[in-house]
Amino acid sequence: MLRRFDVPGPRYTSYPTADRFIEAFGADAHANALRLRSEASVGGGQPLSIYVHVPFCESVCYYCACNKVITRRHERAVPFLQALAAEVALHSDALGRGQAVSQVHLGGGSPTFLNDEELAQLMDLLRAHFRIVPGAELSIEIDPRTVDAQRLAALRGMGFNRLSFGVQDFDARVQQAVHRVQPLEMVRGLMQSARALGFNSINVDLIYGLPQQTQLSVATTIAQVIELQPDRIALYAYAHLPARFKPQRRIHAAELPPAADRVLMLEGAVAQFLDAGYVYIGMDHFARPTDPLAIAKRQGRLHRNFQGYSTQPDCDLIGLGPSAISRIGASYSQNAKDLQGWYDALAQGRFAVERGLALSRDDLLRRAVIMALMCQGRLEFESIELSHLISVPQHFREEISRLQPLAEAGLVELGPDAIQITPAGWYVVRAIAMVFDRHLQSDRQRERFSRVI
């Protein structure tokens, strides 16, 4: 039954999805969105979220689909930080200095490609232009191969309170097949150090569907991760799209587990995490019951942004660095993906935005519907009807009829005043959300996305 609904589809970290952005929405449109916010026309008083994309990695992981630059020349960090300072200043000038920020996330690439002095310089830069509020979430993605206990202590001293370790898999054969070798003991030592240093939350990223993986090897890795007791776990499905992502061409398709095994891997992993006391947040996220993410899920306060599930209220996001995406008011904008293109725009004193989108009224309505399903697993008709002045059964008559096969399969429950995703439906929540995606037109377009399972 799950294989029947295992179709290619978006992850819905935004709606509309980034593949719908257009070049007609460029730097000037982004500047205008910032101006509207600064004039308080569009949610001006709410704290911001900031994402910084550090594109550099020392070595390539064959599964990776991120925007990255592979280099061992660490001196390349110098012009990057200079350009980043220019980009921060442009935003600060447009919004006004000292805007409140409640969330900062450093991703990549590998943010820990930067040395401690450079990371401190980056955080000082942000603090010089923005006001990071007390209790703000300051998180950073960690490549375990690039840090030790001393580096973790330095990060804690910079104010970081959340870490995300890229583990993927602990099996030696799998690590060799994807060109990312990092033994269990290395990660165990780092996590022990992180806890001793007082980090509020530790996340572990895992991937299933990688070459050389078996049901047994994945179950073994899951058991080892549970023993490490991370606060949060992200279990991603590997998306093999070698036509789009060149490093994946080094993976032998014959070594990938078949679709039936992938379903069993996911099912087994979910069972192991639930048996260990973790809460299934949705899609590919798990958290300990006391973690703010699990608490937000129970209280109906879960949100979703470009970093995945979040406890942060629906707020404007400033994306800094090549390929970073911003969300300001009813608009999205994405920076140039190419590092040199990003440099060139900032050298000319303009925003490096390459494309984006101004959301229509219909986009805003459908975003609210999709995010309710993705975050709460339930669409309450009344809240949508009051916010958007429509009748859900009438406005979405066609979409609700297309949900009927999923309802007959036991994945959703269709009521007179709500749509409820069942426990089994969480496996394919993306497929459920896709029903409400007006932009997702043809099967040919869908093939550019990863499969749901």
Image (spheres, rainbow, N blue to C red):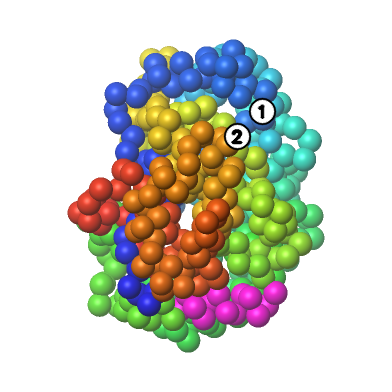
The answer to if 373 sits in the magenta stretch is no
Image side of residue 126 versus residue 172, left or right: right
Q: Which residue is mark 2?
A: 315
Please tell me whether mark 1 sits on a helix, a strand or a loop: loop
- Is residue 369 left or right of 376 when viewed as pictured? left
Which disc is residue 208 wearing? none
Q: Position of residue 260 (x, y in %)?
A: 35, 80
Q: Amino acid at mark 1?
A: Gln
Span colored in magenta:
265-277
Please give the residue where the numbered disc 1 appears in the rendered image.
46
Q: Quadrant of residue 239?
A: bottom left
The image quadrant of residue 2 is bottom left
Is residue 125 visible in the rendered image? The answer is: yes
Q: Which corner quadrant holds the C terminus?
A: bottom left
Query: Image check: 222 left or right of 201?
Result: left
The quadrant of the image that shows the N terminus is bottom left
Is the residue 230 above or below the residue 322 in the image? below
Q: Residues within 10 Å of mark 1 (few under 14, many from 20)?
A: some
Decide: few, some or many residues near mark 2? Use Cα within 10 Å; few <14, some 14-19, many ≥20: many
